[in-house]
Amino acid sequence: MIYDNHNRPITYLRLAVTDRCNLRCFYCMPEEGIKYLPKHQVLTYEEMERVVRVLARLGVQKVRITGGEPFVRAGLMDFLHRLAAIDGLNDISLTTNGVLTAPHITDLAALGVRSVNLSLDTLDRERFRQITRRDELPAVLKTLDGLLSAGIQTKINAVVMDGQNTQDLVPLSDLTRTLPVDVRFIEEMPFNGEGSHYPVLNWTHQRIIDEIRAHFPDLQKLPDPPFSTSANYQIPGHQGTIGVIAAFSRTFCGTCNRIRLTAQGTLKTCLYDNGVLDIRALLRRGASDEELTAAFLQAFAHRPLNGFEAEQQRSVQSGAPVSESMATIGG
Ligand code: SAM
């Protein structure tokens, strides 16, 4: 097991297999004018597999595939099969918007994919269309149904947006009444391809939970699993759970065990950093596994204490605040 300079184990990789997406969620990317990476700048599956092997030898046990939308990249299922054969990895999970996912669910279950995070910000078709700029709610609900029928642990991730979907807090929470899903509400972050954000975040994790409690006064706090980013709750008698992720308030950095690899092969040791290592350059100039390992260890030895420190270092280094689309990072 590898520990960082703040004594946090590094065991979890979030791997963005593409920066492309088939939705245009307004809080993630602009409607038009997106500059996707040219194909040769995106890591090949072979390159990604090699990086995961090296990281697995260093103690990474869990990989979450993300994007962009992972299912828009051709060959994803073959890649997952190759990952499943890597020694030391014991958890392969996925984050998806659910639009193209349903036909792959049986294969995902057969592969042993343990959990899928499904992004779903509203149950209202018109609001879904406004938020994502696509009319795909029925396809997403079909995926939700398919995942639950296949017995795959499913977390619904909903970004809470001031003036957009706060009326969905209660209906989404109420899904837990009859479905064994974990519905998690995420504070909105400025990763929207434009960098704009509210002067003050109106819907903080505290306000989100207060609003849910106002409708479900029996809401009970659950113990949070180790390394959890969400504070978890349950309404007595409900099958599923409710979580709140303080992604902008950054309350969970002290136990952060995760690193990220973007589609172009940039290592991030914090969501808010500017990228700390160009893995693609190392791979393409023929670095050995030993050199890759040494570069990872060096990066892990210099992790920022928290997302505030990372953001501050980033503005000193580049003069630029957080502004890129989350589709380039993977969430
Ligand atoms: N396409 C996949 C999906 O929709 O789950 C994976 C990539 S997406 C970038 C991963 C997660 O990031 C989604 O749950 C999405 O809602 C979240 N996300 C994107 N932009 C965000 C923002 N500005 N603030 C908070 N979460 C954001």
Image (cartoon, rainbow, N blue to C red):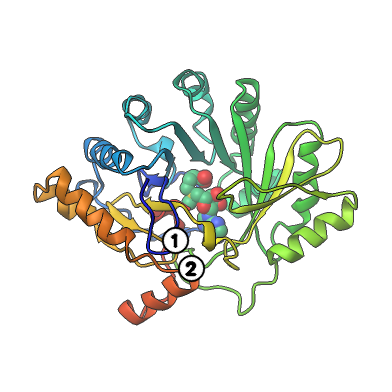
Query: Circle 1: is it few (<14), some (14-19), or many (20+) Cα within 10 Å?
Result: many
Query: Mark 2 is on which residue type?
Result: Gly
Q: Is residue 133 above or below residue 316?
A: above
Image quarter (top left, top right, bottom left or bottom right) of the N terminus: top left
Q: CA distance from mark 2 to mark 1?
A: 7 Å
Relative image position of residue 47 (x, y in whole percent): 22, 40
Relative image position of residue 122 (x, y in whole percent): 69, 47
At 81% across and 62% down in the image, what residue appears? 210
At 63% across and 31% down in the image, what residue appears? 144
Which secondary structure lies at badge 2?
helix
Is residue 42 visible to the viewer in this orientation of the structure?
yes
Is residue 27 visible to the viewer in this orientation of the structure?
no
Mark 2 C-beta closer than 8 Å to ligand 1: no
Q: Is residue 145 above or below residue 225?
A: above
Residue that badge 1 annotates: 271
Residue that badge 2 annotates: 307
